[in-house]
Image: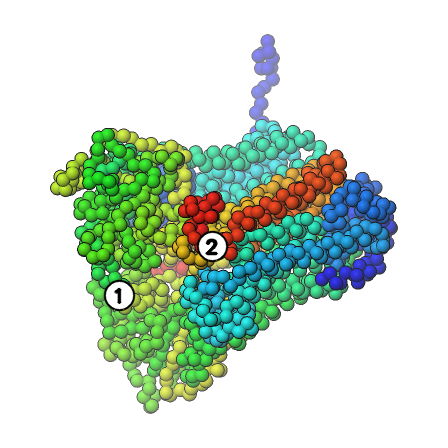
Amino acid sequence: MYAAAPATGAAQPESHPPPLRGFQAAGDVRSGQLQLSSVCTRCSPLMRGVSRRHAMSPGTHPPACPATPSPVMTCSMDSVSRGAVQEGARPGPEVGLRMPRALRGGQAEPGPRCGALRQRESRVPAEGQSRCPDSAPALAALGDVGGGWAALGFVTVLGFASRFYRLPQPPHVCWDETHFGKMGSYYINRTFFFDVHPPLGKMLIGLAGYLSGYDGTFPFQKPGDRYEQHNYIGMRGFCAFLGSCLVPFVYLTVLELSKSLPAALLSAFILIFDTGCITLSQYILLDPILMFFIMAAVLSMVKYNSCADRPFSLPWWFWLSLTGVNLAGAMGVKFVGLFVVILVGLNTISDLWDLLGDLSLSLIMFGKHLLARVLCLILLPLSLYMALFAVHFAILNKSGPGDGFYSSAFQSRLIGNNLHNVSIPEHLAYGSVITMKNLRMAGGYLHSHWHLYPEGVGARQQQVTAYLHKDLNNLWIIKKYDSNTDHLDPSCTVEFVRHGDIIRLEHKETSRNLHSHQHEAPLTRKHFQVTGYGINGTGDSNDFWRIEVVGRKSGKLIKVLRSQIRLTHVATGCLLGSSGKTLPKWGWEQVEVTCTPYLKENPSSLWNIEDHINPKLPNISLDVLKPSFTEILLESHMVMIRGNSGLKPKENEVTSKPWHWPINYQGLRFSGINETDYRVYLLGNPVVWWLNLVTIGVYFLMTTSTAVAMKRGVQQMTEHRELFQVLLQGGGQIMLGWLLHYLPFFMMGRVLYFHHYFPAMLFSSMLTGITWDTLLKFCTGHLLSSTMAWKVYTCGVLTLVLLIVYSFYLFHPLSYGMVGPMASDPNSPMAGLRWLESWEF
Amino acid sequence: MPVLGALKRPVLLRAEINVSLVALAVAAVASRLWGLAGPRAVVFDEVYYGQFVSLYVKRIFFVDDSGPPLGHALLALGGYLGGFDGNFLWNRIGAEYTMNVPVWSLRLLPAVAGALCVPLAYQILVELRFSHCAALGAALLILLENSLITQSRLMLLESILIFFILLAVLSYLKFCNSQKRSPFSATWWFWLLLTGVACSCAVGVKYMGLFTYVLLLVIAGIHFWHLIGDQALSKVSVLCHLLARGLALVVIPVAMYLSFFYLHLTLLYRSGPHDQIMTSAFQASLEGGLARITQGQPLEIAYGSQITLRNVLGKPMPCWLHSHKNTYPIRYENGRGSSHQQQVTCYPFKDVNNWWIVKDPGTQQLVVSNPPRPIRHGHIVQLVHGITTRYLNTHDVAAPLSPHAQEVSCYIDYNISMPAQNLWRVEIVNRESDADVWKTILSEVRFVHVNTSAMLKLSGVALPDWGYRQLEVVGEKLSKGYHQSMLWNVEEHRYGKSQEQKEREVELHSPTQIDISKNLSFMAKFTELQWKILTLKNEDTEHKYSSSPLAWITMDTNIVYWLHPASGAQIHLIGNMLIWTSANAATLAYLCLFLWYLLRRRRRICDVPEDVWWAWVFAGGLCVGGWAANYLPFFLMEKTLFLYHYLPALTFQILLIPVVLQHLNDHFCRSQLSKHMFQALIVAWFSSVYLTYRTFSPLTYGEPPLSPAELRALRWKESWDILIRKH
């Protein structure tokens, strides 16, 4: 990204007139007016009143702020002149007097190519610089670019080293590797499976395994299984690579937002030396992949924000579309990616809001802006996301363990499934022999057998259950309710079943009718019992059911596989459904079938026809019925969402709570329990995490006091105002990211784990870098001598870094593995480090 | 003489009476109170709230997870004033009330609260600076809304909730307006304090009130933010403003909320059917029940004590550690083996087999020495089952239903290579220091197995028939931190006196009686009760009339409240269709207009004058915000939802209709002619609202009974459930 620097740097003077003129001259309306209006809103309520009154006279464009001579203008000018003029006048090291070189270099550091921050005021110093490119500060800045490069290289190398160190250890399956490694193998073997997350992460793992020579034969049965000769390093290495990329991403993001090298370094160090991030990056998991896309999306969003002054330029398009690509990636790994989509969405809305308020921009231009964002941030990610699923379905074309979660129509796509390549009659007719499958997830087939309900469970009639396996007892014959004619008799004409018909279902093996009555069901007491009743098809009026297709008007035919049907009991008006509860032993542990009086549309009371035998009808190939791509896309999302909400914690089970996470209350065992095991424990570096926690409080205090002070119109020094600008704007974006990635977990009903916090932890670390940098600069700014200030500031940053490094030294066995006595044993080297009783290492 | 001087002039009292307001109030009272005592039968949720009224009148403690106690207390107040003795069995909707139930006074309070909403709506619109006509319109709409009438006329809480919500909104508006005129004046204080009080009452009636409370807090926050920017105010006065608001809007509501619970706990001092949900300590603080048994037990557990151990979590049901003669089956159905030792379970009933004796591993003694040696945190004990004298034991055998955990048994020595492992370390979880003594009822204790460091835990699964469906108890090895299912507390306790088995059995069968009393502080009781209210979950989430929030906006569902057994007269919760539709239209119109204005203003084009714009934003923010705050959170809830949950949101939405209408009239009808036409339309619309109200009033009031044909005509929507008798 740095390579683009000279070109854009050169282009800048053309697009922007020199800033000093730009203020007075009406010529550059855009930058001048924007500059002023944004200053107006911020610094001077008095002036804002003026401008509002102007604005309110309808129709007329107000002269707005430029006409009013304002102290605010001079104060903002001040920053310009100090930035540009002073530096220009006094070359050499003395420039560093007011502020240490590194710091100021950080501020003015061109860094990202598009020159300036999106915040209009900060653009000014950069412009000032571009005006005198050959003056000494620019040289100094160039030196700093070198420094920035070196720092970037340094943290990247450290990041990679920390993640790849002892990567093959332990050589057995750790924690969720058993799931995701297995799913990688499924991709290599092309067998279909079900998971609650979208496919991208597992696809990438599979790809990495494939490329590194893993053949997909390792079973990944349970944690602790040894890999033996199987090649697992490729998959782990891929995850570790993405996990290592987080470090430069964080570094660049913070640098872009704060324009301060120490802040960026601090954030990068926090990430490098956090044991939790290291552990999470070293194994075959979705989290490093997810975090990679989240951070990449944030970085490209920040970059494209900084290109705001040169819309529709090449880098602008590049970063904008890259944001979209990364959003698709994040969503494609886990649905948690939605949070970063919201973050980018909110940012885009505020961006558009600013553009809309810029009266120098015509509505057509605004429309172009809007379209570009719709294209890159909505259409592009959406199509990528769908392409992802297309690849997923294309790769997984063999029947596998996931079949049962999907509808019959879906299964017909899979090679090896018994619905694949069969041909059956399309429309249901009287006399057809059918099987009916319940639409709830992993719902069984409607089933009956020669066994009665036991004494005391409703009426003592034949059991009707839902059974998950294919079996002759799943076959039912569909008959007219009022006649017992054999429709298969060749003399009869074929009569199709229509939506709304009243039918009778006769069990083929036992010749009893599907029956319901007002006895309570065996397990779900509020529902009615469903039984098999009658002899050789002769029963009573409680055997009549109305067959209806969901969302259809009367008279239409009923399609095999595709139609979702509902069976309403005519006498009582209840709906045939499967409750999903397992019957006791007398019911052979099959699933309960009931008739529910609550007329609610949900999958447990919907069925579809799967097998269909009727010799009088022409068979058609199921390929005709094959669901379209949109249908399977929708279905797999429904199944995923249902699967996710099905992950409920059980009663009497200890689960991780969201409030545990930021305080690092409890870790996760990745490997090993006993003293002799090789133990890896996912736990954040406590020093880092508690520093992050404290920082959030500090940040709130600082922003609140600053905002109140600004609202009260307290005059501040220019440097302070710039500092607070970074804190409010850059820090605000990061803070929003943290909130978005953390708060929603409080509302989730599903089982939660500690590792869900890590995306939020990335934001928290960036916030720590920005906040402490600002705080130290602010505090040292009050010192009389600037050399003194510089020293104190450096000491502060160094102390923090050393603290982090030292704590990492203490806690590194958590990630890199430890053998020997548990920490609760006083002989253990970790004994003194068990600061919380809830830590189990 | 000054007195005489004062008498020189006539004493004049000048009163201004807003006749339309009075008329509205009278009409509202009439509409809500007309025929209030009929039907003389239990209608819908009266069956639910009625039982609490009975318990209140009888001063029996109960826990209701549906909300805080103020609502129940207010309903009970009606019963108390009507002289209700609490003797009615609330078991079935439609059951006839007996003569001792004062139906009229029980239903009076909700009805009056519902009636008062009408003048409140009027006042709110006036305070929002809208015209008298708009205010009149709002009040009329509330007056003619069938669902609000139905809900007010029965012994239910929604109308009281809506009353407090509207009161809070009105007082905040009054406060805002007096802020501009005279801050810190008496009226200013009055309305500010009333806002806080009304908010806390709304929250106290139902937790739904929280939504409006938060909304008002946000609005107050925004207003205060503007106040900070006002540089004419000194720093001190800004601080005073902040403190006053903090006091009235935070401190007072919290204090009031606590006081509701204080009232609740003071009034209900007798033990009752819900005791089991609470901890032993709480139960012991109630009169009767557990207190009768535990009154005067020795406080400190000593070696030789006889105790019963209750699981602290008590889910799926409260139970006590139990054992009996029967052993685990040698092989389970799935083929796994067991130790075939004596079963240890958790049993939900009081039983002599729940008694255990705490024994010192060092001696053989099963009685308490003199002086008693109390057990402290960290001591190692053996637990001996009182009746069978076997030791509580766990070992590396998979538990029957939770195979990842260890089996817990009472050890039988089969002379095979399976030694007894019966040492347990006592860990008091809620200790203050490590030297704490294990106390009856108060201490929550973990039993950590010495050999395997497994913890005694209730797994919550019911054993099959061989275990008599009692609950499984396991030794949890992978214990992750603190969970209540691993905590036990001593409930009944006495010092063992007899060393002989026979004597001890007699002793165990006899009731405990010694003397010491234990008292819980109010805060401890409050915390526990509050926690129970928030965490209790009703298992069954299915109900015939439950509905999803999406169906509320369009009123796709209704609820049948009551059906006359003979005549076919019925009461439904069914709204005035016209009002619901118009309210939706108004919301939509408001949002579109708002967005349009907002975007245009951003481009510096002002369609309406500044003050009109801000009034429009404020009124809309309040009404649409109130609607959204009271409606949208339901999408995140997993509990059973009913149409009546929508009524507070609907009230806000109704208030928006006149706001939008007046705006359209003032700013879109340019000519005099179009204004007249618009007003004529409004009048026509109002008359059709009235007609709709009349049409559905038989279903609102439950009389007169309608014929099947008439009922069929009322079924305006396919999805409505209207009961038509077949002949």
Instruction: Return the x and y of residue B24 as percentages of the image width and height.
Output: 52, 41
Question: Is residue B8 toward the left or the right of residue A827 in the image?
Answer: right
User: What amino acid does circle 1 point to?
Assistant: Gly
Q: Is A338 situated left or right of A680 in this image?
A: right
Q: Amino acid at mark 2?
A: Met
**Given the image, what chain letter belongs to the residue carrying mark 1?**
B
**Residue hosting label 2:** A818
Instruction: Please name the residue shown 70% across and 59% down the image.
Output: A304
Residue B560 seen in the figure: no
In front of the other: label 1 or label 2?
2
**Mark 1 closeness class: few <14, some 14–19, many ≥20 residues within 10 Å:** few
- Element assignment for label 2: loop
The residue closer to the viewer here, B47 or B25, is: B47
| B659 sits left or right of B707 in the view | right
> Residue A352 occupies which quadrant of the picture?
bottom right
> Mark 2 packing: few (<14 Cα in 10 Å), some, or many (20+)?
many
- Which residue is located at x 34 percent, y 38 percent? B377
- How many labels sit on residues? 2
Assign a secondary structure to mark 1: loop
Residue A681 location (% of width, % of height) = 47, 54
Determine which residue is flagged by label 1.
B335
B177, A193: nearer the viewer: A193
Q: How is the image coloured?
A: rainbow
Toward the left, the furthest residue is B502
Camera sees residue A472: yes
Say which chain tag 2 marks. Answer: A
**Residue drawn 38% across the image and 48% down it:** B483
Residue A234 higher or lower than B134, as above or below = below
Asked if labels 2 and 1 touch by Cβ distance under 8 angstroms, the answer is no
